[in-house]
Amino acid sequence: MDKDTRLKLAVQKSGRLTDPCLDLLTRCGLKLSRGRDQLMGYGENLPLDVLFVRDDDIPDLVQQDVCDLGLVGLNVLEETRLELAANGVAARFDTLRELDFGRCRLAIAVPDGKSYDGSRSLQGKRIATTYPRMLERFLQERQVQAEIVTLSGSVEIAPRIGRADFVCDLVSTGSTLQANHLREVETVLESHAVLIRTPVQLAREKEDWIARLLLRIDGVQQVKESKYIMLHAPRSALPEIRRLLPGSEYPTILPLEGTTDKVAVHAVCRENIFWETLESLKQAGASSVLVLPVEKMLA
Ligand code: ATP
Ligand code: ZN
């Protein structure tokens, strides 16, 4: 009975995606009690359970209908898709949402001091990676023949130990590359976390809960950047002030007691408000400016 009505979501057990995924779920209102074995998290207040696994297994778990949903990096998803295609199997996962965390890129890097002159420089060279399928596609698209050295980890040391001439690895800030005396030269894939689901039609309750979850995720993603701004302004400055407020639709204009030429402006801005904007607002005539975080939003 449980099996048919409770959603099962795969999440990375321990790694870079774990905290942001759990944070997203918490913001969506999910209270999880993690089992003693820590492999399953039971949704106490929603019919959704979390399976904690290695990130590489997440697309397969959805592919095989063990899980209805998965949170995973686009890098892992695309590599799995290509791997399945190479074996003549069609991927059975649909992307429901692109998420604003887990940002990184799959990049090719060359050892410091080595020259690089476009993808031709890769011709006949050895490139170490844990993403052989995506690298293969990248090379094919550029009609470059190179040897792909598939490793299961520690790709960045491959040039130093003589196993490869280049690396193709995940980068976010670039500090790991720098520490290993490598310089980024090509981007193979821009990545971020995504929410995927099985293309199989699920029981009605499950489908309804997915729809609700998506609304909540959209709300969570919107409020992260959103601010509520309140200020006082001369009526004559309103057009300029509206122009300056980033990502706001219709501000609320309220009269101020004791004056006719000044009003209060309240608005939701769907982008962060920086000091520069506040300074421009002040120049335009705004005073008593308050910027508040937005906690929840439902469109
Ligand atoms: P697992 O044990 O689950 O296989 P892992 O070592 O493969 O873990 P992590 O290093 O935790 O994985 O990275 C998980 C995901 O985080 C990556 O697949 C990628 O989508 C994302 N990510 C974001 N920034 C980076 C980065 N700088 N390096 C690696 N991955 C990153
Ligand atoms: Zn992994």
Image (spheres, rainbow, N blue to C red):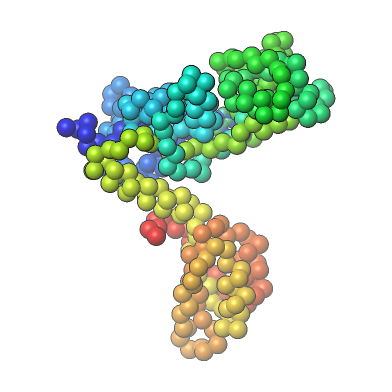
Residue at the top extreme?
A: 162
Q: Is residue 110 left or right of residue 213?
A: right
In this view, the residue in front, 250 or 150, is: 150
Residue 141, horizontal then vertical, whole percent: 67, 29
Quadrant containing the N terminus in the rendered view: top left
* Residue at x 44% of width, y 27% of height: 90
- The quadrant in which residue 137 appears is top right
Instruction: Please tell me which residue is depicted at 38% across the width and 58% down the height of the picture.
Output: 298
Q: Is residue 110 visible?
A: yes
Q: Check the picture and name the quadrant holding the C terminus.
A: bottom left
Residue at 69% from the left image edge and 10% from the top image edge: 163
Q: Is residue 219 left or right of residue 285?
A: left
Figure quadrant of residue 69:
top left
Q: Determine if residue 176 is in view.
A: no
Q: Give the image location of residue 19, x and y in percent.
A: 44, 35
Q: Position of residue 186 (x, y in %)?
A: 70, 31
- Image coordinates for residue 172, horizontal then vertical, percent: 61, 34
How many numbered callouts? 0
In the image, 114: left or right of 97? right
When the figure is inspected, residue 197 is found, relative to residue 38, above or below; the finding is below
Q: Residue at point 62% right, 20% down?
A: 129
Q: Nearer the viewer, residue 30 or 90?
A: 90
The picture quadrant where one finds residue 39 is top left
Q: Nearer the viewer, residue 264 or 186?
A: 186
Residue reaching furthest to the front: 88
* For residue 234, above or below residue 196: below
